[in-house]
Image (cartoon, grey):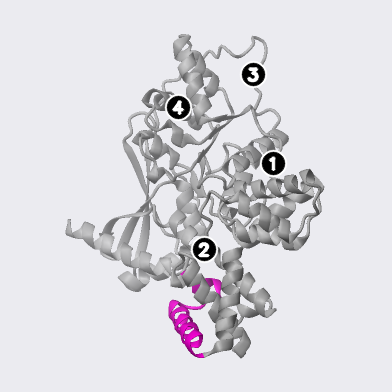
Amino acid sequence: MVEEKACVTVWNNCLDIIKDNVSPQSYRTWFQPIKAVKLKGEILTIQVPSQFFYEWLEQHYIDLLKKTVKKEIGPDGKLEYSIVMDNAFNAKPYTTKIPSSGKGNIKNQPVHMPININETSIRNPFIIPGLKKIQVDPQLNPNFSFETYVEGECNRLARSAGYAVAQKPGGTSFNPLLIYGNGGLGKTHLANAIGIEVKNLHSDKTVLYVSADKFQTQFVDAIMDNKKNDFIHFYQSIDVLIIDDVQFFAGKEKTQDAFFHIFNHLHQNGKQIILTSDKAPVDMQGVEQRLLSRFKWGLSADLQSPDLETRIAILKKKLYNDGIEMPYEVIEYIAYSITTNVRELEGALISLLAQSSLNKKNITIDLAKEMLDKFVKNTAREISIDYIQKVVCDYFDIPIELMKSKTRKREIVQARQLAMYFSKQLTKNSLANIGMHCGNKDHATVLHACKTVNNLIDTDKQFRGYVSDIEKKLTLN
């Protein structure tokens, strides 16, 4: 027990250092799932969920891990990996220890799961005699391709993993590939894009996209028609199976049991499984543990809310694909106003185009403001830091890049302080986050800026006028 507490303490100390040296998304993806299991002498053993996980850490974070471990344990500190997978049939853990290479290169030490399979021939009732492959409509949306998917910092990991899967379905460590994130961030688009690319590159592969809700309905119908085995055998014949919104399996025990057997068969036979969910596996409620453990075998990649540049790129791509021209200031206004959801972003654009067409009005910034007021009438729309910075910089006629720079010119410092002040007043962001958006300043600088603005409001009439004007622009928009 003492040893267990010691290893957890050492690893938590390591995590404190690592957290300051990687992005929040990378920390959640690659370090939160790790567990400390043993500390023996100067060797710390950590448990990772898959072979791919180990390879990624060795390739991308070995220097950081090595320095961190040596700092906590001493100059002779070493790191060992314990890779634990569940046996697909009897759920007994299988562990292998792989010492850290201590270098940036990966050692080729594959992990094999000792699975005993009783081979039986499976008759698939959907295969026509004489044909080697069944003919299946993949149910893919042709509009959701990689060509129409805009890549940004918010989705780069998921998009890169998805593209790798499409090149070599079933032949990468991303199996299953679980894409998760809030609604409207592009999970369905990316899942379809993978399927379309597989069909383009591997025409012999049988690809099927199906929502979890439809899968469950089909399963209930199969039970009612006494065709449960036919249903399972059909899905076991698919080469690339894409299940959208797997969180809807929660609480449906028989559906989960059927999917469990389908998953095992596909995975063991080198077939590709792609899943989407609005939650990470660790946050899914009502899903059996044996399924959740399988969801973690490959890669879980999250989609974040798109940043400003990505939002603008999404709108421009949509307009380009539809052959429509629109003033850049209008595109920028929409991107500044809707910050969290790609679906809402595209919906606002469609609403604006409809308003322009039906009322025979030119698309202007005023029409965009009028439309957005109606579009978000029933929702509490929080002003973004990006938009506050734009309004402040437009008011003083200075570039945003200059406001975020390190210059100490009085007018620039004043604009920066006002942006920090309004960000604190009108958003729920932390001081640290506000500072990061305003040129990587720390929270103390933001506090100082707010105090300075409050003092000037009390003592400087002209400055008080600036604050009043900007406040009106922000609250009106």
Real-space Cα distance between discs 2 and 4? 39 Å
Mark 4 and mark 3: Cα distance apart in space: 20 Å
Precedes in sequence: disc 1 or disc 2: 2
Q: Nearer the viewer, residue 218 or 8?
A: 218
Quadrant (top left/top right/bottom left/bottom right) for the N terminus: bottom left
Q: Position of residue 411 (x, y in %)?
A: 62, 87
The residue under label 2 is 104
What residue is rendered at 29% in x and 65% in y?
10
Residue 346 shows in this picture: yes
Nearest-to-viewer mark from 1 and 2: 1
Give above or below for 431 relative to 294.
below
Q: Are marks 1 and 3 in contact (CB under 8 Å)?
A: no
Query: Callout 4: helix, strand or loop?
Result: helix
Give the distance between the C-alpha atoms of the residues marked 3 and 2, in whole angstroms.
45 Å
Residue 394 part of the magenta-drawn span: no
- Kindly identify the amino acid type of the residue bearing the numbered disc 3: Ile
Query: Quarter of the image holding residue 384?
Result: bottom right
List the residue tagged with mark 1: 145
- What's the distance in space between the residues labelled 1 and 2, CA to CA? 35 Å
Instruction: Kindly state the secondary structure of the residue where label 2 is placed.
Output: loop
Residue at 47 percent of width and 63 percent of height: 62
Seen from the viewer's position, the closer of residues 193 and 337 is: 337
The residue carrying mark 3 is 134
Which residue does the numbered mark 4 point to in the structure image? 259
Q: Nearer the viewer, residue 322 or 263?
A: 322
Which one is earlier in the sequence, the residue at label 1 or at label 3? 3
**In the visual, does 350 lie left or right of 471?**
right
- Earlier sequence position, callout 4 versus callout 3: 3
Amino acid found under the numbered disc labelled 4: Phe
Number of callouts: 4
* The furthest residue to the left: 1
Helix, strand or loop at mark 1? loop
